[in-house]
Amino acid sequence: MNKQILTGSFSFILILIVIITMSQSCTRIDAGHEGVLVKLYGSDKGVQDVSLVTGRVWYNPLTEEVFQFPTFVQTIDYNEFTVNAKDGSVFSVDPTISFRVIPGESPRIFGKYRKDIDQITQTTLYNYTRDAFRIQFNQYSTDSIISNRQSFEDKVQIALDKALRKEGFELEQMTSGLQYPDVIVQAVNLKNKAVQQAMQVENELKVAEAQARKKIVEAEAEAKANDLRQRTLTPMLIQQQFIEKWDGKTPLYGNSPVFFKNVDQ
């Protein structure tokens, strides 16, 4: 009787294990992801040389494990770090990169690093990003970086994309967050201030010159007007203006005006 009970209990437990195993041997790969099937035991232990498509995936949870790798574009903002230029100047870099896993490369990536995408992003990709900036900075002087910043950043991006592609990643976009040394910033500010002051002085000189020219023009015009008045103010004209303004009354005292004189004398 006890033997039958034990046999029945063992059968029940075995059936329960089979049910639990069957219920856990199916998973769904989310859209925008690749599934990586990993053998945990056996002679073929390791990452299968296949990428599992989106959808449901059946596997043996006792001997296999499925990891999901996102294939959509991800953006990571790394912490700021410093890099030396060719002439020793220290620049600060606060990079942000957007990248994605190249379709079909998930098994190779996981097989090499044995980490999930978040861990790889914070370690491997971060190191590649630092190296890309360090290598380019070592080839540029401070003046060259300032004068050719766009060209410098383009070369960093090209170098980083080339390095990431070898690891199964594609760089979509990169911003450097490049910050100049304090000494350079102060020098640039002083230069800009001097340029602004020079422009202000130049503008003031232009205004003064314009005002001076205006006064000269006004004086010349006034002189010409006076000269014209003197040349046109004849005795006959004076007599005519007097007659036009006279009200016809004689003065109450003093000498009476002589209205008609020989203007030819």
Image (cartoon, rainbow, N blue to C red):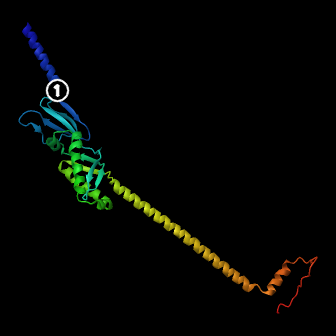
Q: Is residue 183 above or below residue 237?
A: above
Residue appearing at x 22%, y 40% in the figure? 117
In this orientation, does residue 101 appear? no
Q: Is residue 216 above or below residue 50?
A: below
Q: Nearer the viewer, residue 199 or 79?
A: 199
Q: Residue furthest right?
A: 252
Query: Residue 245: percent from the left, percent from the top?
Result: 84, 77
Query: Residue 8: percent from the left, percent from the top?
Result: 11, 13
Which quarter of the rendering shows the N terminus?
Answer: top left
The total of numbered circles placed on residues is: 1
Instruction: State left or right for residue 154 relative to residue 43.
Output: right
Residue appearing at x 12%, y 14% in the figure? 9
Q: Is residue 5 above or below residue 153?
A: above
Q: Residue 250 falls in which quadrant of the image?
A: bottom right
Q: Residue furthest left?
A: 43
Q: Nearer the viewer, residue 51 or 258?
A: 258
In this orientation, does residue 111 appear? yes
Which quarter of the rendering shows the C terminus?
Answer: bottom right
Give the labeled residue for mark 1: 22
Q: Residue furthest top?
A: 1
Query: Residue 53: percent from the left, percent from the top?
Result: 20, 40
Q: Residue 108 falls in which quadrant of the image?
A: top left
Label 1's element?
A: helix
Residue appearing at x 92%, y 79% in the figure? 254
Query: Residue 64: percent from the left, percent from the top?
Result: 13, 33
| Disc 1 crowd, CA 10 A, few/some/many (<14, 14-19, 20+) | some
